[in-house]
Image (spheres, coloured by chain):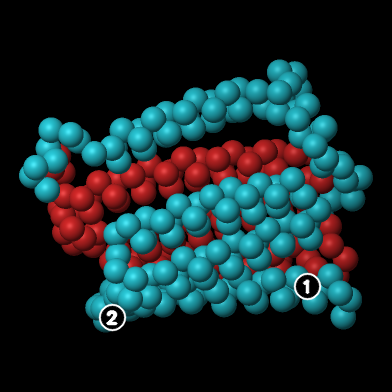
Amino acid sequence: MIEGIGIEHFLVVSTLMFFIGVCGFIIRRNLITMLMSIELILNSVNINFLVFNRYLYPDQMQGHFFSLFIVGIAAAEASVAIALIINIYRNLQNIDVENVSEMKY
Amino acid sequence: MSLSVFMFYLLSGIILTFSVLSVTTRRILRAAVYLLFVLVATSGLYFMLKYEFMAAVQLTLYAGGIVVLIIFSILLTHHISHRFKRPETMNLLMGIGVAVVGSGVVLATLLTHPFIASNSPELPVDMSVIGNQLLSTGKNGYVLPFELISILLLAAMIAAIIIAKKDKNKNSEI
């Protein structure tokens, strides 16, 4: 734990980051920027896991491993999402969510 | 104010500023670069918490891997000087409303809940401890999620290749 900084400071930062991501997910109309908002959300959850692990249970490592697995899942999700986005672009010539209303292959 | 407190506020300021910029900027390549700044500052927070391995994973996988992937896909699908239209007012109001209400509820809960910091001795998180726990089947072993995530990564890799592959028979249609 860090001298002079309480657990609440970290939690406030990660909460604000989470809701900035949610806000971006609602506002944006482009698939890649929506994916970037999801990355923000996952990242803020990671901060929470590590901070709870370090401050409340420093003799265990559950939070550390969970955030490790979350990073791996985020990488898998981003790669599949970008493959889908490229395929959608190939079919529709743009990647706005309004135009993706049918699954055509 | 000690140096670590100063570093914490600097990193949090960078995180919050650039995440706001990343969801509001109208140039998509800039949004990706702002996201990169957010991820690097987050790995700085992990260094401050003394999770060096996690910070290194964050730097290599997120800042090195995912951001490069996003930038490549931006370059494949957008013209470089492309600017977004302004979002519709209704959308903007809804998004900001959800964010303000949600963060208000969560912050009110957080700041009234008493968190009791533990005084037990800190476990050193070095590579040998991480490796032993990740591959052990006994108490505090994580070999099952480790195997699961390796299968998941393999499946995601195959799926990404198959989805993004050009279909040879359908080439003439495009």
Graded by Cα atoms within 10 Å as few (under 14), some (14 to 19) or many (20 or more), the crowding at tag 1 reads some
Relative to B164, B52 lies left or right: right
As drawn, the chain in red is A
Q: Secondary structure at mark 2?
A: loop
Which residue is label 2 attached to? B86
Q: Residue B7 shows which numbered tag?
A: 1
- What amino acid does circle 1 point to? Met
Residue B124 place in picture, x, y as percent: 87, 42
Residue A36: quadrant of the picture: bottom left
User: What shade does chain B have?
Assistant: cyan
Q: Secondary structure at mark 1?
A: helix
- The answer to whether residue B109 shows anywhere in this view is no
Relative to B47, B124 lies left or right: right
Residue A23 place in picture, x, y as percent: 41, 69
Q: Spot the residue most to the top.
A: B137
Q: Residue at x 30, y 45 (%)?
A: A84
Graded by Cα atoms within 10 Å as few (under 14), some (14 to 19) or many (20 or more), the crowding at tag 2 reads few
Task: Pinpoint the chain carrying mark 2.
Answer: B
Q: Residue A61 shows which numbered tag?
A: none
Q: Residue at x 78, y 26 (%)?
A: B132
- The answer to whether residue A37 shows anywhere in this view is yes
Position of residue A10 relative to residue A88, above or below, is: below
Same chain, labels 2 and 1: yes
Residue B73 place in picture, x, y as percent: 37, 55
Residue A102 place in picture, x, y as percent: 13, 48
Relative to B165, A65 lies left or right: right
Give whichever of B55, B67 is nearer the camera.
B67
Position of the C terminus of chain A, as image quadrant, is top left
